[in-house]
Image (tube, rainbow, N blue to C red):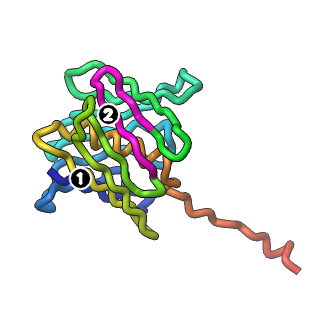
Amino acid sequence: MLYQIHLVNNIFQNQFKVTNQYHEISYFICGCLNTLSQMIILKTKNNEEIGRLYHDKKCPNSKYYIKIKDNAPINITTVNLGYKEVLFAAHLCYWAYGNVKNQQFYCYKGIKKIATIFIAIKSNDITISCDIKDNIDPTYILLTAILITKLHVSTLHLPNLKILTNPQLQA
């Protein structure tokens, strides 16, 4: 199943739609994407929370967790292998690796490839496409795709700075 997350550059929008291959809204990503420490919540069309991505602020080495409804939080470990980066969830035996320069990551459960994540960066928006194989629950993969984007893509919500000038100082 193909899912797309449309991250549009809008500083007032904190809810992003996730559409399926038929361009129907399947989920919503809620939260502010401008800092790594902000919590992200994945909700259904009926506004029911099914998962969240959050940062452990007590830990100086940037631990991230994915909490899926009715399950224990899953620690996400990040390992940098030079030109590739690996995200690993030991509890589920899930791992993802890839390179933002090539704009794609691959998700595995054990040795079986379960998803491909493509990140398309344009001047005013980012579209994340998740091609999920079989009938795998998309919750973990969608939240992993958001984590990858937050770690590697510059912020979408840049404030509009108003530079105040004092007319008396201008000569």
Q: Main secondary structure of the magenta part?
A: strand
Q: Is residue 165 magenta?
A: no
Residue to which mark 1 is pinned: 18
The residue furthest right is 171
Q: Is residue 77 above or below residue 148?
A: above
Q: How busy is the neighbourhood of tag 2: few (under 14 within 10 Å), some, or many (20 plus)?
A: many
Q: Secondary structure at mark 1?
A: strand
| Segment colored magenta | 86-99
Horizontal and vertical percent position of residue 5: 29, 54
Distance Cα–Cα, label 1 vs label 2: 15 Å
- Residue at the location (14% across, 58% down)? 21
Locate residue 110: give its quadrant. Answer: top left
The residue furthest front is 111
Residue to which mark 2 is pinned: 52
Amino acid carrying label 2: it is: Arg
Q: Is residue 166 left or right of residue 4?
A: right
Q: Secondary structure at mark 2?
A: strand
Q: Earlier in the sequence, mark 1 or mark 2?
A: 1
Task: Specify whether residue 156 is in view.
Answer: no
Amino acid carrying label 1: it is: Val
Q: Is residue 7 left or right of residue 20?
A: right
Q: Nearer the viewer, residue 35 or 64?
A: 64
Task: Specify whether residue 108 is in view.
Answer: yes
- Residue at the location (41% across, 46% down)? 98
- Residue at the location (49% across, 49% down)? 152
